[in-house]
Amino acid sequence: MKTKSPVARTQLLATLVALTGAACLTPPHRGGQSAAEAAAAGRGTSGSGALSAVAYRYQSVVLLGGGFVTGVIFSPAKAGILYARTDIGGAYRFDTDTQSWIPLTDFIGKADRNNLGIESIAPDPVEPNRVYMAVGMYSQSWAPSGAFMRSDNRGDTWETIPIANLKMGGNEDGRSNGERLAVDPHQTQILYFGSRRSGLWKSTDSASSWSKVESFPVKEDPSGLGIPFVVFDPKSGASGQPTPTLYAGASNTQVGLYRTVDAGRSWTPVPKQPTGMMPSHAEFDTNGVLYLSYGSGPGPSNVTDGAIYRYEPKTGTWTDITPIQPTRVNEQFGYGAVAVDRLRPGTLLASTMDRWSAGEVFRSTDAGKTWKPLMARAELDAGGAPWVYGHQEQIPAPQWVGDISIDPFASGHAALVTGGGVWASEDVTAADRDQPTHWVFSNKNLEETVVLDMVSPPSGPLLLTAIGDICGFRHDRLDQSPSRGSFDHPHCANSTAIDFAQAKPNVVVRVGSYPWDGSKPPRGAISTDAGATWTQFRSEPQQSGGSGTVALSADASTIVWAPRSTRAAYSKDQGATWTRVAGLPNAGQIPDWAPLNLRLAADRVNARKFYAYDALAGLAYASSTGGTEFVRTVTDLPTLPDYQLSGASIQAVPGFEGDVWVTTGKEPLHSTDSGQSYSPLDGVEEADAIGFGRAAPGQKYPALYLSGKVKGTSGFFRSDDAGGTFVRINDDAHQYGGSNQILGDPRVYGRVYVAGSGRGILYGEPE
């Protein structure tokens, strides 16, 4: 599946990681306190004394994949243990009993969300319960240092070992390469780690402490690519002694492979190695032969050349065993990965990279002398995820196959990664009999997606979501992937905002970016059947850069769209024509990866009222003219830098005219006079997101849900009295990296929807 460019993916996801069941169909409950009483409560404090908690059970809203899984790693110590790493959504372990993935890093909170970028995973080659990870999302100067993590129960719990001034890049170029982290098979307390910027590192105490290998020739790499893999030669040395021979790659097109034969005391380039490309993966088979994949760049995109090589250490012989040679003019591509069958020496799998015309996985049973293409005849099973069809009749062959692995205990079992998830086969050996192989999209409970916006209307679907990289979805059920697949007409790469008309919830609008196929339809659409089908806008605002934010009036008569690169505009004819809004500023000059600074909301009662918050300038605006003209109302709201804009929002309360809330990543602000003034909510230190759901029994004001910090505790919270008091509704084991999207279900009191940090959508209900 051709999905995305690496720059777009990395920049989009940086936005979210700025590093600082059946529904009740009855209408929302309206009994209890008056609107005035609720508003007064909203200006109160969050109560005194200790913060109380309500036990909640969280489950994934089923989408099935959609995000970049960067590696799949089998344990060499015991059958049935398989790990997956992702660029921004943490790590997973496959459960063979349920045939689903178990999230291993849900305990990570907002303060440590950088650790949800998994740079590398290394299972202990002897002790099956022990596994290590190198974690950290970015290696730039502004990013925090990374860490190592260690588990003795297959990732059920972890010990985190911070390491100062060593940064990881789980969401950077080359993120599918590896593995960078390796455990010595003869003396397992020894580990090596190939960093991106700071050379080679070594631990002799099971990752408790680390020191730089000063003898390694590549000491620094300002490019941030560094050392993509470390591999031990298990045929060298003996048990109980450090393995003397190991290899380390370098992201360099001239010298890409180094070797030590004295347990790391000295290193030399491997003689006669290929040049002009950089290595991405290396694996030994049980005959002691090393196989490597090469590309013109680190991947995952812009790889225009590549190769597969065999190296025989005994003779020092290099052999080019590339399945298909990339051409220089008509078809430029590279190779993403190579894998060996440890039960059958000389049996290999290799994947192309950026071969958009026909992405392929090749199989060889004679050490690369001949190859058979698998995907040309493969039978692909969506695994319950209709969106992988991409609105085509047949499922496209997997693309961005940056890692592929063969089960060391079962030759027929293989798994590969893509920009959208994991594919697995139980019969890759069928190709040896000239029969098709079968691959299943295997992402049950691996929900590593980026949610950019979501709404829960009072009727119709339970959720409507705007999703990074796969446009968005209508969710009629929470326990299965949406049957219609992702949004179409137009399809898009990213939907950045979605809204419905409160009085006519079947009318929905969305805006986003161009599709990945290079076409350029208008970047917005309207639905009159609650997102089941869509009609693309006939035009865009003048000089529009697409994406941005959108609001739909309560009666569905007016769309206000604030796109990138220009001033907000309104449409009274369902997106056929657009007129510039008076009184609002032009879109801020912000980086492509940051969300738009100008946030919009439509009053949920009065169709003539709209609200806006410019988070860069700290200004509030309001309209009482149906969105045609806005007036600046407040000039001293908090300002946010571009890297914190994901914490900015403005929300109007259903059922209460003129009731508006603003989040700024700091204390929330509340208006009860149609945005003319805003008051801080005492007792809440931080609010990254606010949403509303069905009111508690005996109350009129909707239940208020908040992602942020209350009384010094970070988490998710619910208030049944308009912010007067809060209870925590998650615990330290279920933090999901924090959230910039939270809302309640308007039909089920207590149900909350949370968009985790690269963890898809979770829904929680009181236990």
Image (cartoon, grey):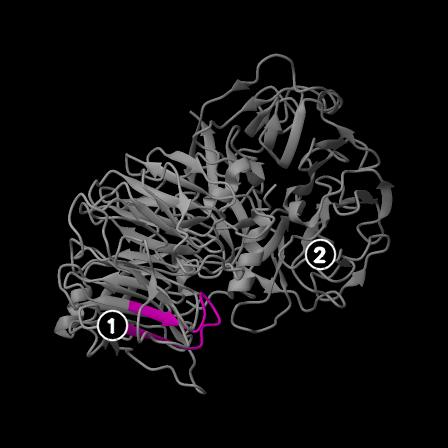
Q: Residue furthest top?
A: 49
Query: Which sits earlier in the primary sequence, circle 2 or circle 1?
Result: 1
Q: Residues within 10 Å of mark 1 (few under 14, many from 20)?
A: many
Indicate whether 228 appears above or below 461. Answer: below
Distance between mark 2 and mark 1 Cα atoms: 47 Å
Q: Is residue 238 visible?
A: yes
Q: Nearer the viewer, residue 218 or 451?
A: 218
Is the C terminus in the top left, top right, bottom left or bottom right quadrant?
A: top left
Residue 549 pos. (x, y %): 68, 53
Label 2 sits on residue: 590
Quadrant location of the N terminus in the rendered image: bottom left
Looking at the image, which residue is at 84% across and 36% down?
Answer: 676
Query: Residue flagged by tag 1: what amino acid is it?
Result: Arg
664 or 546, nearer to the observer: 664
x, y percent for residue 363: 22, 71
Instruction: Provide the residue designation for mark 1.
Output: 310
Magenta-tinted stretch: 292-309
Q: Amino acid at mark 2?
A: Ile
Seen in the picture, residue 295 relative to 646 is either above or below; the reply is below
> What is the secondary structure assignment of the residue under circle 2?
loop
- The spot of residue 766 in percent (x, y) is 46, 26
